[in-house]
């Protein structure tokens, strides 16, 4: 990010160009471009390896049980197909990347808000090991799931980009990323309401 800020002072078109890599390499000495590539690859490759190794676990959490080999194959195809489409088929890397980040930001903001809210209100001593056992009576945190769906959909309603125009994306919500903050705020409200409802239900069951 710091490098991008410095480069934008040399090449003001860096932030708006459809080919940021071409502009970047034109502004930098050729030898520095090689170092940049090695640093970027060195940072991304370990993350990809860790993500691939944990991919099977991620699938298992949503009820899809496959072998490690099958999981690696599925995610390998996805990892290869997306860059090929973005770089060689779509023809506009920056625009597609911004759309991807916009949608991803909304989904992640609501998820993080729910995770933190649930941790503060219900998991002060950490997650109970019994909840993670196969024979656990609780398989899904429906309050968190429903809260995430509501918050994410609400964030999309206040967001607009090249492929989506939310019905409430007007005035201060037009052409910016405020939908990310809306989704986070709605997620916090929803998880609080879910926690209160859950607490009320448990109290009623104890009285009964």
Image (cartoon, rainbow, N blue to C red):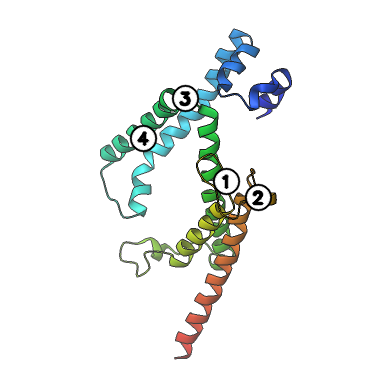
Q: Which residue is mark 3?
A: 91
Instruction: Check whether the beta carbons of the residues at disc 2 and disc 1 lie within 8 A of each other.
Output: yes
Earlier along the polypeptide chain: callout 2 or callout 1?
Answer: 1
| Callout in the foreground (1, 4) | 1
Q: Is residue 112 shown to the viewer in this render? A: no
Instruction: Check whether the beta carbons of the residues at disc 2 and disc 4 lie within 8 A of each other.
Output: no
Q: Secondary structure at mark 3?
A: loop
140 or 95: nearer the viewer: 95
Quarter location, residue 177 = top right
Instruction: Check whether the beta carbons of the residues at disc 1 and disc 4 lie within 8 A of each other.
Output: no
3 or 172: nearer the viewer: 172
Q: Is residue 70 above or below residue 196?
A: above
Q: Which residue is mark 4?
A: 78
Earlier along the polypeptide chain: callout 1 or callout 4?
Answer: 4
Q: Secondary structure at mark 4?
A: helix
Instruction: Check whether the beta carbons of the residues at disc 3 and disc 1 lie within 8 A of each other.
Output: no
- The disc placed on residue 160 is 1
Counting other residues with Cα less than 10 Å from the Cα at mark 4, is it few (<14), some (14-19), or many (20 or more)?
A: few
Q: Which residue is mark 2?
A: 173
């Amino acid at each position: 990010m710091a490098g991008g800020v410095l480069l934008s002072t040399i090449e003001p078109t860096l932030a708006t160009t459809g080919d940021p890599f071409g502009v970047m390499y034109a502004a930098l000495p050729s030898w520095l471009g090689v170092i940049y590539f090695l640093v970027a690859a060195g940072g991304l490759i370990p993350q990809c390896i860790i993500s691939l190794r944990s991919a099977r676990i991620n699938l298992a959490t949503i009820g899809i049980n496959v072998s490690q080999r099958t999981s690696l194959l599925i995610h390998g195809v996805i990892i290869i197909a997306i860059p090929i489409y973005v770089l060689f088929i779509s023809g506009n890397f920056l625009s597609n990347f911004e759309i991807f980040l916009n949608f991803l930001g909304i989904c992640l903001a609501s998820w993080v808000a729910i995770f933190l809210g649930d941790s503060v209100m219900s998991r002060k001593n950490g997650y109970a090991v019994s909840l993670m056992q196969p024979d656990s009576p609780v398989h899904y945190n429906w309050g968190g799931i429903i809260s995430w769906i509501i918050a994410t959909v609400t964030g999309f309603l206040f967001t607009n980009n090249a492929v989506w125009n939310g019905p409430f994306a007007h005035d201060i919500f037009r052409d910016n990323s405020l939908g990310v903050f809306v989704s986070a705020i709605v997620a916090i409200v929803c998880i609080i309401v879910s926690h209160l409802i859950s607490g009320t239900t448990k109290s009623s069951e104890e009285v009964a």
